[in-house]
Amino acid sequence: MDSSYAPGYVTITFDPVNGLESIRASLLGILLKWWDTHKTKWNDIDAITQCMMQMVLFKIRSLQEAMKGLPLVPNGQKQTIYLDLSNMASITRGLYESAFIYHNIFISTDNEDERQVLINIWKIEGYNNRHKVPVPESMEEDVAQNINTIESLRNATKEILSRMHITESARNKIEKIIKKDSCNIKGYCFVKSDNRIIGFEPIDFTNARSTFEYEFMDGTYSYLSYQSHPSFLSLLQFGQLTGKEHFSDMVKPFLMTACFCATKFTNDACKVLTDGESIKKKVASNVLATINFFENI
């Protein structure tokens, strides 16, 4: 990260390659310190958070490996090194989705009951995935257990709703959602008036403002999606800019987006994880420099 000065202006040049590595080091340092000081049985929130931290770390490493490029034919002969842009877009989209869902469940909610309702919906939608594919007879017992788990989550959610300050129409909306066998992951918003929940609305991944405060993140998810899928535009761009010499043209936008998403997730996770903020402060300041930079933009 370099900066230059002119009268009344400060220009900052940011290298997303080094930035992404710095964010990875920050997240890993926080996770390792947390593991070292929290060896007893974890609560559900800590267990989810530390697991998602690992998943984000693996996504960052996968993106870093993809940045190296690869030849079309793995025979060792000298040939053009290509960048798999669709794969890089897919990994970056995964980082976006992780930051989005975590923020929606753990940061945007106002109290423990709201948080638990969203966690239960998230779990139900996840377990519903297991009913979308055929399974061998040897797994029938697992399927039955899966159904019981979903039903338990539904009942637990209804019990939470019974003690919340919520209108009947809003409660019915939530109960309708948990009854469905949908597995389409999305965010949700509690609509309130005078501290009473009067509505419950879905939030699509394309709604970047629900998670990120920056206007330039608008349209990011759609961009990553058309780059990930075999759309004609992604095909056209792959054909035009696949060689590694076009690195800055197509890859840097992915890396910058990955930096914003990974930083958002890291800072959110530290707010939720038990002792997370104090653990973050114990990580060397030079390691934390990048996530501190993005947090204060």
Image: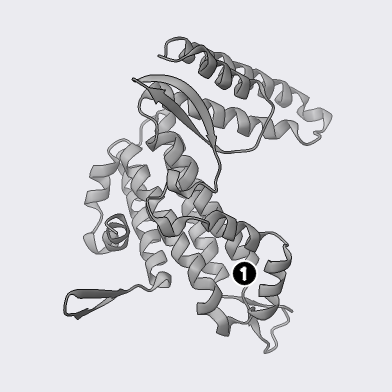
Compared to 195, does 39 lie above or below?
A: below
Amino acid at circle 1: Leu
Q: Which percent across, then down, holds residue 276?
A: 30, 41
Compared to 120, does 67 lie above or below?
A: below
Quarter assignment of residue 129: top right
- The C terminus lies in which quarter of the figure? bottom left
287 or 1: nearer the viewer: 1
Q: Which percent across, then down, holds residue 56?
A: 48, 52
- Relative placement, left or right, of 163 versus 62 is left
How dense is the environment of label 1, judged by Cα within 10 Å: few (below 14), some, or many (20 and up)? many
- Relative placement, left or right, of 170 versus 49 is right
Compared to 129, does 260 lie above or below?
A: below
- Relative placement, left or right, of 156 versus 53 is right
Q: Residue at x 53, y 64 (%)?
A: 63
How many labels, in total?
1
SS assignment at label 1:
helix
Q: Residue at x 53, y 72 (%)?
A: 251
- The N terminus lies in which quarter of the figure? bottom left
Q: Which percent across, then down, holds residue 105?
A: 45, 34
